[in-house]
Image (cartoon, rainbow, N blue to C red):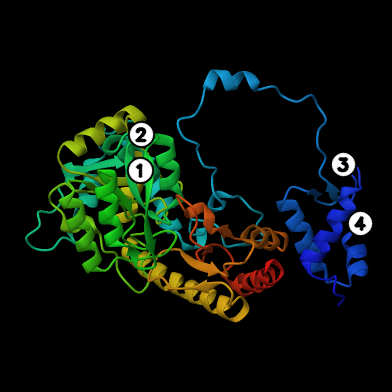
Amino acid sequence: MSEDSSPTRIAAALKRWIATAPPGAKLPSTRSLVAEHGASPVTVQKALRGLAIQGVVESRPGVGTFVRAVRAARPNDYGWQTGALGSPNQRIPQLPAALQSVPNDVVALHSGYPERELLPERLVRAAFTRAARTDALIDRPPTAGLPDLQSWFAAELASATPAGITPAAPSDVVIIPGSQGGLLTAFRSLVGAGRPLLVESPTYWGAILAAAQVGVEIVPVPSGSAGPDPEALSRAFEQTGARAFYAQPTFASPTGALWTPALAERVLDTVRRHGAFLIEDDSAHDFGITADPRPVAAHDDGGHVVYVRSLSKSVSPAVRVAGLIARGPARNRILADTQAESMYVSGVLQAVALDVVTHPGWRAYLRRLRHQLRTRRDLLVESLREHAPGARVEAVPQGGLNLWARLPDAIDLGRVVRECAAAGVVIGSGDEWFPAEPTGQFIRLNYAGPRPGAFPDGARVLGRSLAVAG
């Protein structure tokens, strides 16, 4: 095989050809490219697939691959909107790689959701069938949610509550349309536009997006594989006068951190001392592998912790249902905000969620899921160690859906992402998870995506891309 036989080199050669070709020109056939570059058909297809992802070419099944035509129609004039919209209060970040849609034949390590094989599909389909036969299909549910679903969320948190702490009551629960909606309403209700919100750095990209949408001022607090720095958190409260801290104590995205009981106690003490709120995002609650979730809210009965737990990733992304637990006036403000935002969550979706999580098969599903996630996590870790040692996983997570890997400081991260995409491997740039300047070169790799058998191939591509970009 010649030195020009890698997908990256073939793609580069084709780009040079495309630069001189007219829009709509047909690319040489796969057979001729195989002969020209001394490559296998699979390698050529990877190069073409990478160009398609970049929008350079388009494939027409049964016809061939063509230079993507750029329409020369008159440009649309949206200049009037600049005056109509005015200046934004805060720039809204673009959606990250985690929400990219990609072809089925790529190695997808970028998504934030588990693949279909990991979901309780049988339970979900049966639940929708049963819900369709009930009044949930017609009736409007209570604004705060179905009472039985409120009771389930409260009981789940109460099961982790130690003796001496008053557990959450069903009336403390507000059913919301997914955790993203919960973050928006919590940031609006408890912080407010123009006021400071402390967040871990790095942190969940959806929280950065929600904060920008609401217009709150983000104040980053250093965090890593063990969680946030409690001394830095205390200083941030003192310096900013903030009244809320957003965090993911259980299997944080992207770092995978699981707070120790000692750290949770220090953070909760700090929050109490400053008369503030901890907005606890427990979206990864159901994804424990070698450890169980540790909700900080279970140790608070003073109303300092506002707790959000979503079912959208563990039940189904089509079931956008979450529970938000808050006490006192904070709960009243949150409920008022949700009423203004969405009035109520679909009764059908609530009925489906309740059906699934109270079904006898739910616990069995979670046990299987734990085993599946462990197998996938370990396979990806070993693949990186063998084929891409430059992507260093500083701490193997005890749960969650992804690995957080650090690359050499001198690496061109953008080039690594592009080189991988050209070779048919989609990864997430770590820059998207920092609310301020990144503290290093990181990538986020999801081990819950499709085709885990391709993880070694993906790691090989990453290793070669690191060599090229370095």
Query: At 38% across and 44% down in the image, what residue appears?
Result: 218
Mark 3 residue element: loop
Q: How far apart are marks 1 and 2 (CA)?
A: 16 Å
Q: How far apart are marks 3 and 2 (CA)?
A: 48 Å
Residue type marked 4: Pro
**Cβ atoms under marks 3 and 4 closer than 8 Å:** no
Residue type marked 2: Gly
Of mark 1 and mark 2, the one earlier in the sequence is 1
Q: Where is residue 240 in the image (x, y as percent from the top left)?
A: 29, 44
Which of the two discs, 1 and 2, sits closer to the camera? 2
Which of the two discs, 3 and 2, sits closer to the camera? 2
Per the image, the residue denoted by label 4 is 28
Residue 89 in view in this figure: yes
Residue 279 in view in this figure: no
Quadrant assignment, res 210: top left
Of mark 3 and mark 4, the one earlier in the sequence is 3
Residue type marked 3: Pro
Q: Spot the residue most to the bottom.
A: 386
Mark 4 residue element: loop
Of mark 3 and mark 1, the one earlier in the sequence is 3
Q: How far apart are marks 3 and 1 (CA)?
A: 45 Å
Of mark 2 and mark 4, the one earlier in the sequence is 4
